[in-house]
Image: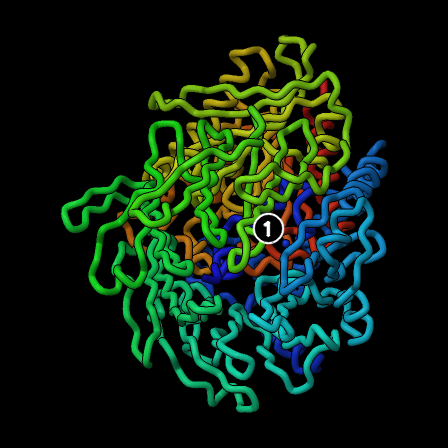
Amino acid sequence: MPQLTHVYLAVGLVLGASSLLCDVARAADATPGSTFAAASAMTHSLAASAPATKPADDPHLWLEGVTDDKALAWVREQNAKAEGEIAAAPGFAKLKSDLLAILDSDARIPAVQKIGDLYYNFWRDKTHPRGVWRRTTLQEYRKAEPQWEIVLDIDALNASEDIPEGKQWVWHGADCLKPEYRRCLISLSPGGSDADVTREFDLETQSFVEDGFYRPMAKGGLQWIDQDTVYVFTDFGPGSLTASGYPRIVKEWKRGTPLAEAKVVYEGKPTDMYIAAFRDLTPGFERDFVNRTIAFYNDELYLRKDGKLVKIDVPNSANKSVHNTWLTVELREPWTVKGNSYVAGSLLVIDFEKFLAGDRGFDAMFVPNDTVSLAGYTWTKRHLVLNLLDDVKSKVRIITPMEGTYGWNQSNLPGAPALGTVSVAAVDNDNSDALWMTASDFLTPSTLSMVEIGKKAEALKTMPPFFEAAGLVAEQKFATSKDGTRVPYFIVRRKDMPLDGANPTLLWGYGGFEVSYTATYSATVGRGWLQQGGVYVLANIRGGGEYGPRWHQAALKANRHKAYEDFAAVAEDLFAKKITSPQHLGAQGGSNGGLLMGNMIVQYPQLFGAVVCQVPLLDMKRYTKLLAGASWMAEYGDPDKPAEWAYIKTFSPYHLLKPETKYPPVLFTTSTKDDRVHPGHARKMMAKMQAMGADVRYYENIEGGHGGAADNAQDAHMRALAYAFLWEKLKR
């Protein structure tokens, strides 16, 4: 069943943050003139976010005007100051050049997706800064230097359509129609914003289809029903979006008819988060589904059959999907059904047709314990494959239905590093039992293998080292938080590191939305920080998913402070072990991690010598009124409710600033094109701290969306700014 990944990436706070720790072995990223009019209208709507706060209450409110001339003049002034300080420093140009060489390197592993009989990859490098969508055969892919056929060149497209600077297309992905795989729906964004267009593309002619399906600029998407029909969820005009700015209505749209005549399939409420629909096109298991996302961790899945919707009757908080014969339910809360009780974090499976007929005899494929949690799962043709974390270290388990009997066989898949990460994904879950397996750790470059379940893994690609790892060691440690909770963290350091408290140390964290961060190879961290002699620390604080739903739920809403206490506890443990000290400890995080950084600045300023705060939320009084903010109330709470504002204000950095407090040096970074987390958060925090005389600087990239950069050159520049700033402030 299609997993509407683009929906959840678009509404979450994960994408920008994960790009900050991007492993370069991963995928580079996995027309009409009216397009630009629509893009301009979208940009105008960003600038017109209706303020409920009066300027007298917030003198920096004017900075929320995303494209307002006065606000952009302020941005340019701050950018010039930051670049004058950081980019002009000795060594910056070399650092940026080295990082760009890594991001552009042909030695990166080109992650591929099987579409029909060919293997597709999206690739960005020096020659193709915006990227090319290309394909090859498996036989060719096995070679050290495969020959690729370019299907779509985004740079050439930008040149041919004479697109103005700042609105050039950024690749958002493709969905190709089974089983012929000739027609695709390609999503493109101007400058990297979440809002994008969808255009129909023909793989045989390698061109966009004249008068084909076209969805104008908006947050939303198209999903294939058949070659002449799609589901469309988008901005249909006034009243068609949720309070979060996402689609509220999904329609069925026939080829050759105006979008305005598309037939309504489902209409959600304005208070919902996102409405979508899709068809499972697996041969023999074709089914239609409607997904109503009410809020994070609260959604309903409906089977659409004979014009009627049948709700899949499992808890709204559960993650649910259908693959061929099986309904899979991942519980986020305890559930008792037909006398059977299951704990949160369990993965349940049942025959889908039997479930629809009333059977509730689930099989528990996974049950968590104190240290082991489910990180994810994938189906092959005949197997269920689980990605597990045991104290944040990877394991893979294979589960197979037993033929001719009722039950399942379980076995472990070899290949996981002792202190690292292994991830698996189906190559083609319709037709084979093959898996892609990627394994790495902090010091070992990634290896991509193909694994036919039951056979020895075939190593296909190994990324070369991008930094000198000799003399380095990676370890896992545990800190004790304020309430006694055991908090894991990873540390990468030199074996001969002196325990004198003076080692420049970078502490990275996220802690939100049930997202886990594990031990993986990051060439840019290696070159930008470790190679300079720094110590790198990754904190697995509450709010994340490292120990399943319970770890996430422990830091929701009124308990948000526990995530911040965990991060502070890791910092203090580093001091106690004499690894570093406050004047040599830096912190970095983006998105929800930017909110974490904001709280480190205002609540724990004594712990840090410098902080990099990227694409952050900071004004938690107004976050629900800015762009997609209303979609995150399940995580943080509703500031318009007095009882909830009472605790939200305790972690709203913008409101916790005090003029008499000495804050650590800070670099704020964001993107003008970020239409997920409003750049006004970073702008206003910068301005307020600047007025207090704090040691702050600010850089806003004009493109890039929530990821912060639209191409490798911008990415390298942003990373270099962060590392150079931190090193200058934290070095011995």
Q: Residue at x 60, y 57 (%)?
A: 674
Q: Quadrant of the C terminus?
A: top right
Which quadrant of the structure image shows residue 614? top right
Q: Secondary structure at mark 1?
A: helix
At horizontal 84% and vertical 41% (from top left) the residue drawn is 97
Measuring from the top left, give residue 32's x and y in whole percent.
70, 82
Q: How is the image coloured?
A: rainbow
Percent x, y of residue 332: 32, 45
Comparing 237 with 171, the one in front is 171
Tell me what residue is drawn at x 75 percent, y 65 percent: 154
Across and down, in percent, residue 231 comes to 47, 76
The picture quadrant where one finds residue 96 is: top right
Nearest the viewer among 76 and 40 is 40
Q: Is residue 649 visible?
A: yes
Of residues 160 and 318, the one nearer the viewer is 318
Q: Amino acid at mark 1?
A: Arg
Task: Say if 371 sits above or below 213 in the image.
Answer: above
Give the residue pinned by disc 1: 683
